Image (cartoon, rainbow, N blue to C red):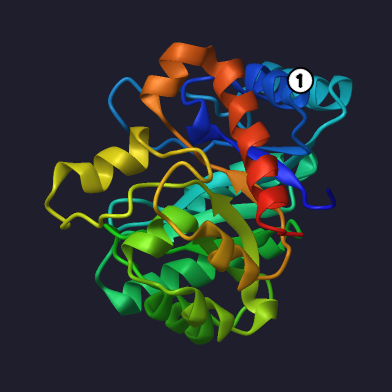
Amino acid sequence: MSRKFSLAYLTIPGADPVSQIRIAAEAGYDFVSLRPIPMHLPNEPLFQFDQDRKLFVDVRNALEENSIGLMDIELARVREDLKVEDFESAFAAGAELGATDVLSSIWTEDRTFAIKEFSKICEMAAKYDLNVNLEFVTFAGIKGLTDALEILDEVDMPNAYLMVDTLHAHRSNVSPDDLAKVDRSKFGFIHLCDGPLEVPSLDDPSMIGVAREGRLYPGMGGIDISAYLKAMPSNPVSIELPNSAEFEKRGAAGHAAQCLIQAKRYFKENHID
């Protein structure tokens, strides 16, 4: 199969970068997607390899020893209480480790502020030859395809791309036809997972709950992943599939491996390149 796959941090949350790299390599992934930028969550483990030289060296050695690449780093969020300038050291370290991309999302309703700060992120990333992938998240400030495309058009940066997460696309009522109408050159990498067919209300706990710990293996839910993927270019796929039950049952390595096994099976059964 020519499609490239990356193991996203959130699939095995809490795993340190070296363990994530080893698990990804053993499972057969082509890349990893690491999280050096803190989310400022309670009890969050910090893996800031941009500020910890020993960790940086350990990550670099793990990538080399396991013959696997670093695709993207995350998460460069736009929010009023965050200074995007603080992300630059992670961009620099990520690029030094071979990263090609940054994942970004917008968590403010202030469109002017969002455009200004997202532009800064793109400008900083460009200094390190990194692409910035803007993800729309159903419960964020930029929550749908139209809004995301408007931001990209306003910013008009050559290294800014659209990142589609199949769960958020489904829950934001984005159709495959909507994606098919987008200029194919605007797409970046893709987040892959399945999920329930039913779309909960924004105030339903399952809206965030499923996104953070209840995503499903491809083909095990109600999302028409095949139609989404066929509406987009054959860009790299980062499997972001947190599922606390599967994680507990299979362990980090077992869950990561099953994600890739099921994804490749789904691609083959649905004739997806």
Q: Nearer the viewer, residue 4 or 137?
A: 4
Quadrant for residue 198, please give it: bottom left
Q: Is residue 210 visible?
A: yes
Residue identifier under label 1 = 26
Q: Residue at x 33, y 70 (%)?
A: 173
Quarter of the view holding residue 231: bottom right
Locate residue 141 relative to residue 250 in the image: left or right. Answer: left
Closer to us: 262 or 169: 262
Total marks placed? 1
Q: Residue furthest front?
A: 269
Vertical comparison of 29 with 155: above or below: above
Nearest the eye: 20 or 257: 257
User: Residue at 55% across / 63% down in the picture?
Assistant: 163
Instruction: Give the residue displayed 67% in from the left and 54% down from the top.
Output: 101
**Which type of secondary structure does the marked residue at label 1 adopt?**
helix
Q: Is residue 54 left or right of residue 118?
A: right
Seen in the picture, residue 187 relative to 104 is either above or below; the reply is below
Quarter of the rendering occupied by the C terminus: bottom right
Q: Which residue is at 63% across, 77% downward? A: 186
Where residue 90 appears, x then y in whole percent?
60, 42
In this picture, residue 65 sits left or right of residue 12: right
Q: Position of residue 32 (x, y in %)?
A: 68, 36
Q: Amino acid at mark 1?
A: Glu
